[in-house]
Amino acid sequence: MQLSDFDFDLPDTLIATRPAAPRSSARLLVAGPDSLADARVTDLPDWLRPGDRLVLNDTRVIPARLSGLRHRSGAQGDTAARIEVTLLEPRASGGWAALVKPLKKIRVGEELVFSDDLSAVLEAVEDGQGVFRFNLTGADFDDALADAGAMPLPPYIAARRAADDRDRTDYQTVFARRAGAVAAPTASLHFDEALLERLSAQGIAFSHVTLHVGAGTFLPVKVEDVTRHRMHAEWGEVSARAAAEIAATKAAGGRVIPVGTTALRLIETAARNGAIEPWEGDTDIFIYPGFEFRVTDALMTNFHLPKSTLMMLVSALMGQERVRQIYAHAIRERYRFFSYGDASLLFPAGCEKRG
């Protein structure tokens, strides 16, 4: 299984830099084994039935992108350097791993000042990343980070424009609760309160799980034999309540439909023993063609990058040739791609599309 098997040509003009407004007005490509339908996210209730369960990732994106000053005094007097920091994940030691640009302009032991309230000392450099210890913890840290930080937009958006105040709302789901992600579960960005209420009134159930999406989600696959790729690890939790809800839906013959690849990866991690169970920890599950799905019946997801692990995941669900057909249609019909783009609803063979 070669990396080139998951490649395709995407016009730059189809890369979305802003979401649809309102968010539920985004387009929705509904795909089965041998059918395609062009719809809107607002039409989602038409494609689901009472007894279905949507699994939602309730992680909350932190404003992880920081700009700080490093000060020095020496023979040349007082100098300062502007350094950009993107937080990646908290460490058990209390520090934070981060990307640093330019890393060569700061030494271990030096301080970066991000605002009047927030600063951090570089404690170590590991694998090309910095490890920082901040001057604040807990709620004080959260408040200062909210003031000083910016939303960590994906590289393909950040290369086209800077983050702004709109992204603080646009790049956050309406059901975000547990802070810790540095990238959004983007399929969930299409939901608003009105759509959630319509789905609930129709008898669609919801379960919330948590996977703190890391910046590793944007890392390229660097091996040609994709089976040799090692996934980045991300922390997640499937609570006892969520596991019981999902198990009950399966037992009753309902369909379990994760919203986004993050929710799918998490519930399949929690079902590695054959049935869904409560689970907490770091998951590095890698889903590619040949994977046996234990609990996932269908998937709502955005359109993904060529040669990405997410293309491999949807290919595992739908089949490689079918995904090529789906993406060819999406490009031909000018669907918008990636984090702020449009959505797809994927029903593999054996999963009815309508009740």
Image: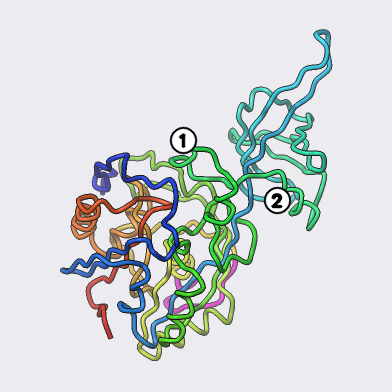
> Can you give x and y, in whole percent of width and height, for residue 38 in the image?
24, 65
Name the residue type under label 2: Ala
Q: Amino acid at mark 1?
A: Ala
Specify start and end residues of the magenta stretch as a single range.
Answer: 270-280
Identify residue for label 2.
146
The residue that appears at 59% across and 76% down in the rendered structure is 239
Vertical placement of 7 versus 329: above or below? above
Colouring rule applied to residues: rainbow
- Observer-nearest residue: 73 or 198? 198
**75 in magenta:** no
| Cα gap from disc 2 to disc 1, whole angstroms | 23 Å
From the top left corner, tell me how far across and down residue 280 is, in percent.
59, 68
Q: Position of residue 29 (x, y in %)?
A: 28, 63
**Relative vertical location of residue 105 with respect to residue 176 in this rendering, above or below:** above
Location of residue 17 by image quarter: top left
> Residue at 37% across / 86% down in the picture?
254
Which labelled disc corresponds to residue 201? none
- Is residue 324 left or right of 170 when viewed as pictured? left
Residue tagged 1: 159
Residue 274 lies within the magenta run: yes
Query: Quarter of the image holding residue 121?
Result: top right
Query: In the structure shown, which secondary structural element does the residue marked by tag 2 occupy?
Result: helix
